Amino acid sequence: MRRSWVLVAATAVAAATATLAPGGQQFPVPPPPLSEDYYPCAQNCHNDLRTDPKPRVLTDEHADIQLHHAEQLRWCLDCHDATDRDKLHLQSGERFGFEESYRLCGQCHGDKYRDWREGIHGKRTGRWNGEKQYLLCAHCHNPHSPRFPDLKPEPPPAVPGSKTLKSHSGAKAH
Amino acid sequence: MSEQKTVPVGEPRQASRRKFLQGVAVGAAAAALPGAAFARATGFLTYDSWKEYFQKQFQQMTPQEVEETLRRLEAKYAGQYGRKVTVKATPPLENVVFGYALDLNRCIGCRRCATACVAENNVLREKEQIQYIKVLRFQDGSMDFEQSERYYDPATVPEEGYYYMPVQCQHCKKAPCNRACPIRATWTEPDGIVVVDYNWCIGCRYCMAACPYEGRYFNWGNPVLPSEELNPETHYLGNRPRMRGVVEKCTFCIQRSREGRYPACAEACPVGARKFGNLLDETSEIRYVLKHHRVFRIKEELLTEPKFFYFFG
């Protein structure tokens, strides 16, 4: 599956930007993983397009985006803003950039949002007693299909005794 | 120390065992240990100077002796691996007791922690490998350690119907391994890290028998560690290269954590399941977990009081 949304990579992690949450708390997060194919959306396409607010399956553009995120209940413009295409919006109508996307996620996933703010949900790097680097939700979860991707596991440890006993040499001796 | 035992009449001067040994040590310090060539060839002996042979237990050393020991080890490792190795003995930080929390809802069993740990801690690279972290696979709804599987090897993880629990040294407050050691080669540091003085360890493996978490590992042979894979930033009580016949274990990456960095496993975890911090700091991540999540410790009924917590985030 093509993951155009997640074009993150190391460059994004290197240049961390700090964003300010409503509570005044600063989160040092890297830039959001936006696809260079599309962003900035308004300038690239949407300024020249008429907005059709009717929920539908997109076939001409963005056909690669597989929505597996309560797709029965929502479509693009529930999260992406119709008037400013480079912004997201809450149910309240409040608009903000992709670098604050955690607020949009936190709208439904409040428990995870709380844990994320405290450094519990999600990966933190840096120092345990000093500066930490956060990641945005979208750095690990594709917002359109948020299940964490399956990974190939590192090889299992060696089975003890495999040198001498043939009967113990199977990789799945247990 | 002033032992004043006189030797039988006929001897012109007072002597003591200690003075005798000191004399031998100083006299032979410059010379190689007799039979060193044989010892190295057979791998039978792990020390290669009298100074190393008479080295004290780490806690008993004066600061000067620690310094001498570190420099001697650095020279030894440089010769052994052909590159610069630093051996530090960074002391514990004030008002810090380390704790660890692992989110079982997040862990996908990818073993990235285990391999990062091996690379960071200079663990041997042979087939009979040691891994400080065992990732156990359980069937959903069960936590029977007897039935857990550690050799699982599917194409991708997580697998349907299973969950994963990484287990490593739990850094118990009342560590049974410490009590089992007949010579105090292992102890708990003031910051809560259970460490081993590899040079003092006699390899009796009582600590391994005492540990309910299988948190300790024994070097049966001379550990194979290719020079290019060596991590040259080491700590005396942590990841400095080990020798044959000693026990080793997870030290919460003492060489990293005492300098404010996260342990290698925490940094390697792709799902962010591993949380590390100061149990005495109310604002730390670990304290937040303890306050806001339901945590448990493995085999709590043994009253070992681990500082390693599991939770469901």
Image (cartoon, helix red, strand yellow):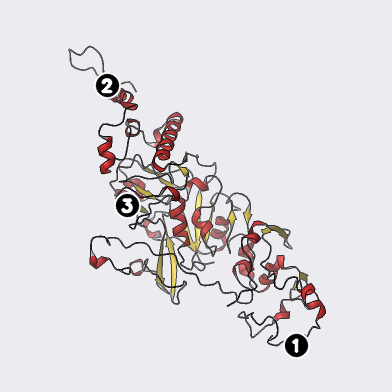
Front of the two marks 2 and 1: 1
Q: Height in image: B7 above or below B128?
A: above
> Callout 1, which amino acid?
Lys
Q: Residue A67, how many percent across, how many down?
A: 63, 81
Q: Secondary structure at mark 2?
A: loop
Q: Residue at x 66, y 60 (%)?
A: A30
Give the Cα separation between the discs numbered 2 and 1: 97 Å
Q: Secondary structure at mark 1?
A: loop
Q: Secondary structure at mark 3?
A: helix
Quarter of the figure that contains the N terminus of chain A = bottom right
In the rendered image, which residue does mark 3 sit on? Answer: B208
Query: Looking at the image, which is closer to me, A35 or B184?
Result: A35
Disc ID at residue B16:
2
Left or right of A49? Residue B50 is left
Q: Residue A159, how many percent across, how many down?
A: 32, 63
The chain letter under disc 3 is B
Binning the other alpha carbons within 10 Å of mark 1 as few (below 14), some (14 to 19) or many (20 upward) gives few
Binning the other alpha carbons within 10 Å of mark 3 as few (below 14), some (14 to 19) or many (20 upward) gives many
Left or right of B139? Residue A1 is right
Front of the two marks 3 and 1: 1
Q: Residue B127, how many percent across, how many down?
A: 34, 58
Give the Cα separation between the discs numbered 2 and 3: 37 Å
Mark with earlier residue (2, 3)? 2
> Callout 2, which amino acid?
Ser
Q: Are marks 2 and 1 in contact (CB under 8 Å)?
A: no
In the rendered image, which residue does mark 1 sit on? Answer: A54
Query: Looking at the image, which is closer to me, B100 or B257?
Result: B257
The chain letter under disc 2 is B
Q: Are marks 3 and 1 in contact (CB under 8 Å)?
A: no
> Callout 3, which amino acid?
Met
Q: Height in image: B238 above or below B25?
A: below
